[in-house]
Amino acid sequence: MSSTTATIPERALARGSAYRTIVAPIVLGVALLGLWQAVVDGFGIEQYIVPTPTDIFHEITDNLGSIVDGSVRTGVNALIGLVVGAFVGILGAVVAGVWRIFDTIVAPLVAALAVMPIVALAPVLYTMYGADKETARQIVAAVAVIVPVYINTLRGLRQVRPVHRDLMRVYAASARQQQLAVTLPTAAPYVFTGLRVASSLAVISALIAEYFGGPIGGLGKSITSSAASSNYALAWAYVFGAIVLGLVFYCAALAVEMFFTRHRSTP
Amino acid sequence: MSDTNQAVEVRAVSRTFGGRKGASVTALESVDLGVAAGEFVSLIGPSGCGKSTLLRLIADLDTPTSGELSVFGKPARQARIDQDYGIAFQQAGLLPWKTVTGNIELPLALHGAGRKERRDRVTELLELIGLTDFAGHYPDQLSGGMQQRVAIARALAESPRLLLMDEPFGALDEMTRERMQNELVRICAETQAAVVFVTHSIPEAVFLSDRVVVMSPRPGRITDVVDVSLGGPAERDDSLREDDAFFHAVATVREALHGVPVGGARGVDNR
C-alpha cells in the first residue's frame, strides 16, 4: 500500500524476521527427514514398517499424476462443502443475530453438531445418495464447516461497539442500513477466522469420508487401497498429497483473512 | 412551540436510572437550560454529575424520566430524525474499514446524497480540518488528534446548526488538545453552529465557551452558570490563554465548581 503502511511497527518487524520465520522451519524439517532416513537405513527397519523419505519421494515422482488427480477430486469435494457450509453458517448466524429466539432454538442443534463425529454419517449418506456419487462426501464436508463458521460469525455480529451503535441511532439509520454499514463489517474478521478453521476441517472431512465407501480416485481411497495392497511408501505419498492439499486450503483462507483485517488494529 | 432562535431548550428535566432490587440512581434532577442559536455552552462538573447524560438526552440517545426537552423547537426525537445536530464522542468512533473520506461521508451516504455532492462536501471538510492529504488513509494510519478531527468533520458533514460534543478532546495530550481547541473556535466561527460541549477541564471550558454551566453530582443538577464572553473568535488565540481575563474566568468557574473561593487567580492548573 502507501508508504505510511511501512511505518506500522508490526509489519516492519515481520519483514525483518522473515528470514528466521521461513528458513528456520525448513532447516528443522530437512534435519528431521535426514534423521528419519538415517534411522531407517541404519537399523535396517523393514520397508513395510516405515519406508524411508527417499522411497516415498520416488513414489511421489512416479505417481505424481495420480496424486494430483486425487488431490483435485478430494479438493473439489472439500471446496464445495466449504462454500455450501459457509453460506449456511453465515446465513444462520445473521438470522440468529437479528432474532435472538432463533439462536436459542438452534443452540442444542449446534451443540449436537459440534460434538458429533460427522464422518460417522458417511456410510448412511452413501446409502441415501448412492455410493457412485460424490454428494455424500460434500455433505459431510459442509456439515463439518457449518458449526465453526456459525459460532464465529455470531460472535462477530455481537462485537458492534456502543459508539457505533449510538452513531447509527444518531443518523436514524434503518435496521438494514445498520447491518450493512456497521454490523456485518464488524463481524467480517470473525467470519474469516471461522473460515480458516473450517477450511482444514473441510479437507479432513472430505478425505476421511472416502474411507467409508464411494467412488475411487480421491486421496482417501488411494491411501486405503495402497495400504491394503501393502504398498506403504505409496500410501505415504498420497498422505503427502493430503498434507499439501490441507496447506493450500489453510493458506488461502489465511490470506483472505489477513487481507480483510489489515486495517483493524486501532480505533 | 418555543422560539426557534433557541437551539436547545431544557425544562425541568430529570433522568432516573433503575438499579437492581428497586435501588435507583438520579442522574439528573430538574435541570433547566437554554442554548441560543450560535452560542457555545460548556457543561462542566465532576464524574457522575450527569453532564454526559444531559448531552445524550439532547441527542435523543436516551429519554428523560420527566420534564420537557426541545431542539430547534421540536421534540428531541424529531430533531434527531431530521438530522438537526451533529455529534462527536470522546472516542472518535471511526469505522476502521473505511478511509478518511469514507468515514466523513458516512452520514451523507446513509441519507442518500449523490456521489458528486458527497465528494464536494468531503473536499470542503478535509480542507476545514486540514487533512486534505490524508483522504485515502485508514483510521489506524492516523494519530489520535487526526482521528478526532475526522470525527468532527463527520459531525459537520450535514452542516448542522447544533453540534453536540462529549469530551471530544478527553483522550488527547495537552498540546494536541490546545491546538484542537484553537481549531474548534475557528470551525465554529466558520459554521455559525451552536455547540453544547461536555468537558471536565476548566481552562478548556473557559477558552471555548460563551457560557459555562457548572454541575454537581448526586443528584446531578446545575449549580451555577458562568458568563465567560472573552470576545469573538478573532481574539481567541493562544495569547488569550495568558490573559488576565482568562485567569479570572478560570478562577470564577473553579470557585463555582468547588463552592469556595480559591486563593489567587494564578493558582490555575492547566488541565
Image (tube, rainbow, N blue to C red):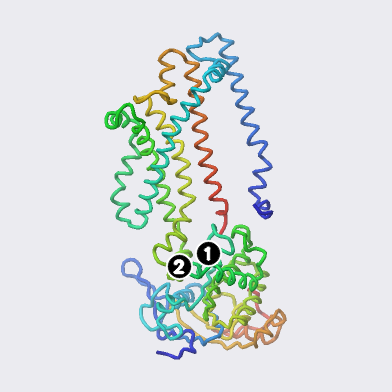
Q: What percent of the width, then of the height, locates residue B86?
A: 51, 75
In which quarter of the view is residue B22 placed? bottom left
Instruction: Calculate the distance from the C-alpha at mark 1 to the C-alpha at mark 2.
Output: 10 Å
Chain ID of residue with mark 1: B
In the image, residue A126 sits, relative to residue B23, either above or below, namely above
- Which image quadrant for residue A38? top right
Q: In the depicted view, which residue is nearer to us: B51 or B165?
A: B165
Specify few, some or many for label 1: CA neighbours under 10 Å numbering under 14, 14-19, or 20 or more.
many
Tag on residue A101? none
Bin the neighbour count of mark 2 within 10 Å (Cα to Cα): few under 14, some 14-19, many 20 and up: some
Task: Please indicate whether residue B32 sits to the left or right of residue B236 in the image.
Answer: left
Image coordinates for residue B82, horizontal then vertical, percent: 44, 77
A161 vs A220: above or below: below
A105 left or right of A18 in image: left
Residue B264 visible, this orientation: no
Q: Position of residue A233 (x, y in %)?
A: 50, 16
Q: Which residue is mark 1?
A: B93
**Amino acid at the residue labelled 2:** Asp
Residue A166 is tagged as 2
Residue B75, percent from left and from top: 40, 81
* C-beta proximity under 8 Å, tags 1 and 2: yes
* Residue B233 visible to an observer of this rendering: yes
